Image: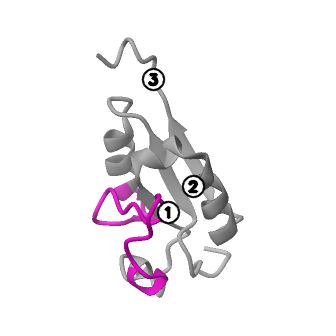
């Protein structure tokens, strides 16, 4: 790996129910360059911050040589303010958004 391991979460999976987010989360967990939080829905950047940043970071081994540290919280895509919070926290983050036709989700 060329770059040092990041010191913050830099990969976010967001989306809607029944769109494949759990599948993508599991697939990313198997990738050797990616560490996904063991808990799928952390909700840190949601309407309320349930944890301090140090508590949030405790979910990730930043001392390990991963290229990406990620989490998957579907409902981040339901609030436009979350995009700003994520950008303020990690402007270099990759955000993978998964959507699906609402009729097909039924």
Discs 2, 1 touching: Cβ within 8 Å: yes
Q: Residue furthest top?
A: 103
Q: Position of residue 59 (x, y in %)?
A: 36, 76
**For the point 36% across and 63% down, which residue is it?**
42
* Front residue (pair 56, 52): 52
Q: Which mark sits nearer the N-terminus, 2 or 3?
A: 2
Q: Which residue is mark 3?
A: 100
Q: Is residue 50 above or below residue 25?
A: below
- The number of numbered discs placed on residues in the rendered structure image is 3
Q: Is residue 61 above or below residue 84?
A: below
Nearer the observer, disc 2 or disc 3?
A: 2
Q: Which mark sits nearer the N-terminus, 2 or 1?
A: 1
Q: Is residue 89 above or below residue 26?
A: below
User: Secondary structure under badge 1?
Assistant: loop
**For the point 63% across and 71% down, which residue is it?**
89
* Front residue (pair 31, 42): 42
Q: Is residue 19 above or below residue 21?
A: above
The magenta stretch is: 29-55
Q: Which residue is mark 1?
A: 45
The answer to whether residue 5 is left or right of residue 40 is right
Which quadrant, please, contains the N terminus?
bottom right
Alpha carbon separation for disc pair 2 and 3: 20 Å
**For the point 53% across and 40% down, which residue is it?**
97
Q: Position of residue 101 (x, y in %)?
A: 45, 17
Q: How is the image coloured?
A: one colour
Q: Which residue is mark 2?
A: 82
Q: Position of residue 90 (x, y in %)?
A: 65, 68
């Amino acid at each position: 790996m060329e770059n040092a391991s990041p010191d913050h979460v830099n990969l976010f999976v967001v989306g809607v129910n029944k769109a494949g987010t759990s599948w993508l989360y599991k697939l990313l967990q198997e990738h050797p360059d990616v560490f996904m939080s063991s808990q799928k829905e952390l909700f840190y950047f949601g309407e309320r911050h349930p944890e301090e940043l140090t508590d949030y970071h405790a979910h990730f081994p930043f001392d390990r040589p991963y290229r990406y540290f990620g989490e998957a919280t579907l409902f981040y895509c339901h609030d436009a303010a979350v995009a700003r919070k994520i950008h303020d926290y990690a402007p270099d983050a990759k955000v993978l958004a998964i959507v699906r036709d609402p009729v097909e989700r039924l």
